[in-house]
Image: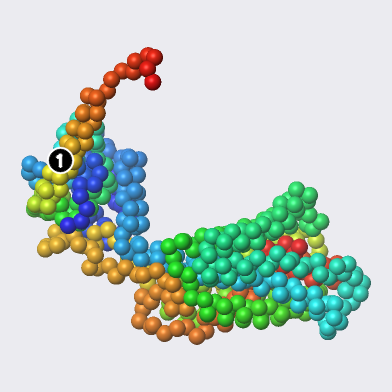
């Protein structure tokens, strides 16, 4: 077990694998969808993230298939991966709660006061 | 395989071979899927004529850089390179440190009536030297100071002194650039090339980071003593060059010394020492080429007979370059491989733990005479110090000064010893 989710891209890759195993291009498509098109992974980026997550034990190989004569590897979350994703969700939720709370404290400045 | 796929595989060659072995097939498959639009005609056109988009190429390049720079093996490689740079820095300071005593000995030789070749004596009688001590640059002592401070672990002071010591040479070249040179037009360009090579070497002192322990003092102090002991020879040898037919200038002497060091097998048993030899070969080649170009230009501009010197210089360049390439190929094979995931991701269990295939992290080298050993030979290299001294001594630029000039050339060009070590002769 190495590092955690790491980057936002790592977070989305883990999220894309949370419901079921996916192959590389399936991850690219799913990440684009769940991020509302904001995060579009390039292949080099995807496999950089995937390699790290696999090395850290957050993701593992589920199965291999040959599709149209080409190799497709499907990946799934490990138990450690689920824990890491949950921890990252909690961290982001706490950050969001904090920011929301601070915004609620905001009061417009009154002219003539220090 | 489509043209597009072939081109993408070419891009993937940026990645380390071990990484490609594990991931290339899958990456190509994913890339190809990502290029499909559903329009069969367009997809076929893309297959035949398409190229990977810039963003895809950049993503692979970034991945390649990360894999090569951040893996444990890459860290081990960086540690070796840093050790080699520290060795280079100390040798360069030693080289420059020898200039001052050599200049003093040369001055004494000329003023004390010591024997000289007949042709040289005639030239000196015809053109007496106004100030034989003009070549003695007392600021040369700063090189010794910088060397000693680095040895003492006072890195900031050592680096500062090294930069200050180089400043006079920079000033001389700048002045020559502004005022112009009395010599041939190519001289200013040559001086700049010479200075830049030396400056690049001095920059290696930056490899002494605050976190790095001081190198072991005794062997380097012995090296300093040996270098100073060699300096009289270096100071006098230029005076015995045939004034009407020189064949060995100081870059040539440097080439010969470097070759002598590079051909000693024992030195290459230590990886940082071997790397240091290779790094030192680069300025040797650089200086050789700078002055070779100068001689060629001089030959074209005047009727000086420098063909022998040029021929020898070309031979030296080829010899040093050939040895450098061989050493480079050999040392690349010895470095630990750069890895991403060395293993195929289908391997189980623990298919992705790369740490067991990488050599254990190498500790920072604190003693350059007992540096990192990736091969089994822990003994100290007994020849390293004297050979380093020889190499350092050969750096002294004592004979290059316009040796292509005819026999009636001003004596200054004969004795134009460069105490600053930048080849400017001032």
In this view of the protein, which residue sits in the foreground, B55 or B168? B168
Which residue sits at x=14%, y=62%? B350
Could you classify mark 1 by the number of other residues whose Cα lies within 10 Å: few (under 14), some (14-19), or many (20 or more)? few
From the viewer's perspective, tell me whether residue B72 is left or right of residue B239.
left
Q: Is residue A76 above or below residue B410?
A: above
Q: Position of residue A108 (x, y in %)?
A: 31, 18
Residue topped by disc 1: A90
Q: Quadrant of residue B293?
A: bottom right
Q: Is residue A21 above or below residue B313?
A: above
From the viewer's perspective, tell me whether residue B133 is left or right of residue B219.
right
Which residue sits at x=9%, y=46%? A21
From the viewer's perspective, tell me whether residue B248 is left or right of residue B13.
right
Q: Residue furthest right?
A: B126
Q: Could you tell me how many numbered marks the image carries? A: 1
Q: Is residue A110 above or below residue B347?
A: above
Please state, as top left, top right, bottom left or bottom right, where the C terminus of chain B lies in the image. Answer: bottom right
Q: Position of residue B113 (x, y in %)?
A: 86, 82
Q: Position of residue B274 (x, y in %)?
A: 46, 74
Q: Quadrant of residue B110?
A: bottom right
Return the chain for callout 1: A
In this view of the protein, which residue sits in the foreground, A89 or B92? A89
Colour setting: rainbow
SS state under label 1: helix
Which residue sits at x=75%, y=48%? B178
Is residue B80 in view from this perspective?
Answer: yes
């Amino acid at each position: 077990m190495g590092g955690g989710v790491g980057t936002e891209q790592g977070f989305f890759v883990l999220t894309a694998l949370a419901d079921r195993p996916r192959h590389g291009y399936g991850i690219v498509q799913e990440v684009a969808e769940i991020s509302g098109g904001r995060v579009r992974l390039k292949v080099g980026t995807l496999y950089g993230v995937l390699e790290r997550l696999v090395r850290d034990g957050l993701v593992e190989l589920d199965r291999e298939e040959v599709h149209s004569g080409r190799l497709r590897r499907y990946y799934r979350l490990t138990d450690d991966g689920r824990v890491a994703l949950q921890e990252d969700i909690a961290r982001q939720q706490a950050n969001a709660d904090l920011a929301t709370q601070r915004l609620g404290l905001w009061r417009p400045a009154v002219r003539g006061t220090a | 395989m489509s043209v597009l796929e072939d081109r993408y595989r070419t891009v993937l060659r940026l990645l380390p071979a071990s990484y490609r072995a594990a991931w290339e097939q899958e990456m190509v498959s994913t890339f190809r899927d990502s290029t499909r639009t559903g329009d069969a005609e367009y997809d076929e056109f893309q297959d035949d004529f398409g190229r990977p988009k810039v963003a895809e190429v950049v993503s692979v390049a970034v991945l390649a850089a990360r894999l090569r720079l951040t893996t444990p093996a890459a860290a081990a490689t960086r540690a070796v390179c840093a050790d080699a740079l520290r060795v280079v820095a100390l040798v360069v300071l030693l080289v420059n440190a020898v200039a001052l005593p050599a200049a003093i000995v040369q001055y004494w030789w000329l003023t004390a009536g010591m024997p000289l070749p007949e042709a040289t004596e005639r030239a000196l009688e015809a053109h007496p030297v106004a100030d034989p001590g003009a070549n003695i640059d007392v600021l040369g002592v700063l090189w010794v100071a910088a060397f000693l401070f680095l040895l003492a672990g006072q890195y900031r002071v050592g680096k500062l002194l090294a930069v200050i010591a180089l400043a006079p040479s920079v000033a001389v070249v700048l002045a020559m650039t502004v005022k112009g040179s009395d010599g041939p037009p190519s001289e200013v360009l040559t001086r700049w090339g010479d200075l830049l090579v030396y400056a690049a070497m001095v920059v290696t002192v930056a490899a002494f980071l605050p976190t790095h322990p001081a190198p072991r003092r005794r062997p380097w102090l012995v090296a300093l003593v040996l270098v100073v002991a060699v300096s009289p020879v270096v100071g006098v040898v230029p005076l015995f060059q045939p004034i009407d037919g020189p064949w060995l200038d100081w870059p040539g002497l440097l080439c010969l010394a470097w070759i002598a060091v590079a051909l000693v097998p024992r030195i290459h048993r230590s990886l940082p020492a071997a790397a240091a030899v290779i790094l030192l070969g680069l300025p040797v080649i650089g200086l050789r080429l700078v002055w070779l170009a100068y001689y060629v230009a001089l030959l074209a501009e005047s009727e000086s007979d420098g063909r022998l010197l040029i021929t020898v210089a070309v031979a030296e360049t080829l010899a040093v370059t050939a040895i450098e390439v061989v050493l480079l190929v050999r040392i690349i094979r010895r470095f630990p491989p750069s890895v991403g995931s060395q293993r195929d991701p289908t391997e189980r269990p623990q298919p992705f733990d790369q740490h067991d295939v990488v050599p254990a992290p190498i500790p920072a080298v604190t003693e350059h005479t007992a540096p990192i050993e990736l091969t089994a030979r822990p003994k100290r290299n007994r020849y390293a110090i004297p050979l380093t001294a020889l190499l350092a001594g050969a750096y002294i630029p004592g004979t290059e000064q316009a040796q292509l000039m005819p026999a009636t050339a001003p004596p200054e060009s004969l004795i134009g010893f460069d105490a600053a070590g930048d080849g400017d002769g001032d």
